[in-house]
Amino acid sequence: MKSLTHLVKRNCKLFFKDKGMFFSACITPFIMLVLYSTFLANVYRDSFTSSLPDLFPVPESLIDATVGGQLVSSLLAVCSVTVAFCCNMLMIQDKTTGAKKDLTVAPVKSSTLALSYYLAAAFSTLLVCLAAAGACLLYLAKVGWYLTAADVVLILLDVFLLVMFGTALSSVVHFFLSTQGQMSAVGTIVSAGYGFICGGYMPIAQFGDGLQKVLSFFPGTYGTCLIRNHVLRGVFAEMKAVGFPADVVEGIRDSIDCNLYFFGTQVEISQMYLVFGCSIAALVGIYVLQNICLRKKSR
């Protein structure tokens, strides 16, 4: 236990001392917030207004709150994974610098070393994502606040689960990488592609039926839907309170991926949690098996 604690502290210190890695991890969510609010806001606004019946009066504050909720949920869903890949780069750097060989020569179990990488990356990613969540909540307070204390707690829970998922996914992928070039290539691919896969850049409801069915198998889709439901719960409650018909509200929920369907069957919130939790457990299990196989091979 002492060895694990020392290794986690060592990994965290190295991450925060590496100004390039730390700065890129911290600045990513805030750059994304600026870009999302600048470029994606109009796309989300058009998507929202197009789902409303013609000549249906909608308060401007509700439109702003809906668009803001989409932006915030998309940002947190995407950055929890992209930041995790950045924070977990130390796992690869130790291979390239030879530090991992030095650590394995010491009386430290390989399983302890692997766990230390995961815990340190999860801790660093969580700090960055919580700071991003704070900035997002301030943004919502500016454009339209319809959240309760329970909503905020659930949003933070979703951020925690997304961080665990992103850290587990990055650990599995980084296990196979051993050079800076590979690390940069994978980071670029994840940054560019993950937002489309999870529905962060564009609602999955706007894709074709075939692609929607394919993306329903990706766990990141359920993570995005979870946090989007909690960010926008108050907005939908306000819509009903001001007289929105139930079918109109459901149409809006469908258009912005608050309702998720698996081959035509709507997925409930509890089922999303189950799928996402099982995905995290599966990725952690794969990471454990990878290290077990490596230990047997080294023997």
Image: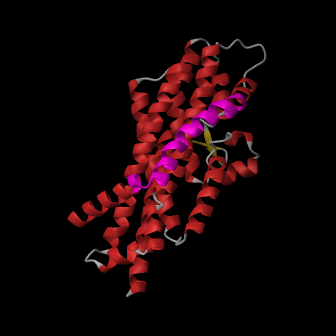
Image coordinates of residue 159 in percent, x first then y, are: 45, 42
The quadrant holding residue 285 is bottom left
Please, which residue is most extreme toward the right here?
Answer: 54
Residue at x 46%, y 35% (from the top left corner): 133
Task: Give left or right: position of 120 versus 3.
Answer: right
Magenta span: 15-43
Whether residue 45 is visible, yes or no, is: yes
Image coordinates of residue 191 in percent, x first then y, are: 61, 52
Image coordinates of residue 165 in percent, x first then y, are: 47, 53
Image coordinates of residue 221 in percent, x first then y, are: 59, 47
Please, which residue is most extreme toward the bottom here?
Answer: 299
Q: Is residue 147 above or below residue 107?
A: above
Q: Is residue 125 above or below residue 142?
A: below
Q: On the rendered image, what quadrant is the C terminus found in?
A: bottom left
Residue at x 46%, y 23% (from the top left corner): 147
Task: Give left or right: position of 160 versus 248.
Answer: left
Q: Nearer the viewer, residue 49 or 144?
A: 144
Residue at x 68%, y 34% (from the top left corner): 40
